[in-house]
């Protein structure tokens, strides 16, 4: 998750050049741009946000409190979400926790998309991609958040959209909206 490809995807989301991104000798993701070297996933994202004028970058640094929360979520994505998504029991708990979190929230921090959402989205992408339709429906709130983000062209970057059709639910929870 905190790899070269993810840094490049997030740089594209923010509309900035990723520069030269590679793993250094210690296998830490490193970005070299304008003869400056930045090490570490969270530090690189912070630098990208400072260089960007995108909506996501501006939302991510709208206040000191928001910046701190965004940074915490990025660190959480790096330290827990990405490694945890490789273990099926931890992954199941992570998905359940995110599903509960999104009961009353549309985004991880505040009311707009931030770098926190991007970091977590890319950290769980492969995990969500492997879910069956019934499993996706058991995480409706997480699925709503994930589908909302993937609909943004700057986020999905040409990847095929994951299917979140709720045909199963429509079969037994029919109703009309006025």
Image (cartoon, rainbow, N blue to C red):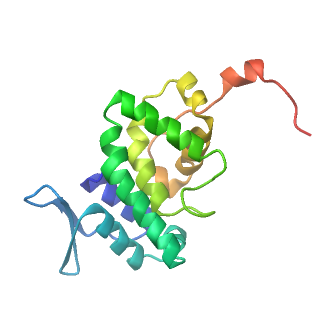
Q: Residue 117 appears at what percent x and percent y?
A: 49, 56
Compared to residue 56, the image places residue 172 above or below, namely: above
Q: Residue 92 appears at what percent x and percent y?
A: 44, 31
Residue lying at 53% horizontally and 25% vertically, measured from the top left: 135
Q: Residue 58 appears at what percent x and percent y?
A: 52, 75
Residue toward you, 151 or 101: 101
Compared to residue 154, the image places residue 178 above or below, namely: above
Residue toward you, 80 or 118: 80
Residue pushed farthest left? 25
**Residue 128 appears in the rendering:** no
Tell whether 39 sits left or right of 148.
left
Compared to residue 136, the image places residue 115 above or below, namely: below
Quadrant location of residue 126?
A: top left
Tell whether 92 sits left or right of 38.
right
Residue lying at 46% horizontally and 72% vertically, measured from the top left: 67
Quadrant location of residue 27?
A: bottom left
Residue lying at 70% horizontally and 24% vertically, measured from the top left: 169
Locate the C terminus by quadrant.
top right
* Count of numbered circles in the view: 0
Q: Residue 60 appears at what percent x and percent y?
A: 49, 70
Residue lying at 55% horizontally and 30% vertically, measured from the top left: 136
**Residue 176 appears in the rendering:** yes
Residue pushed farthest top? 171
């Amino acid at each position: 998750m905190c790899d070269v490809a993810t840094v490049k995807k997030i740089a594209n989301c923010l509309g900035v050049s990723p520069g030269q991104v590679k793993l250094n000798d210690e296998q830490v993701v490193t970005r070299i741009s304008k003869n400056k070297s930045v090490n570490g996933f969270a530090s690189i994202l912070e630098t990208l946000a400072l260089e960007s004028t995108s909506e996501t970058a501006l939302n991510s640094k709208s206040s000191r409190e928001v910046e701190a929360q965004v940074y915490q979520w990025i660190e959480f994505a790096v330290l827990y979400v990405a490694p945890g998504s490789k273990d099926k029991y931890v992954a199941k708990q992570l998905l359940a926790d995110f599903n509960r979190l999104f009961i009353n929230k549309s985004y991880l921090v505040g009311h707009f998309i931030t770098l926190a959402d991007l970091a977590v989205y890319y950290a769980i992408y492969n995990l969500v991609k492997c879910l069956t339709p019934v499993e996706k429906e058991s995480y409706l709130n997480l699925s709503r958040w994930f589908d909302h983000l993937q609909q943004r062209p700057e986020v999905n970057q040409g990847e095929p959209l994951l299917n979140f059709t709720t045909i199963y639910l429509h079969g037994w929870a029919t109703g009309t909206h006025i």
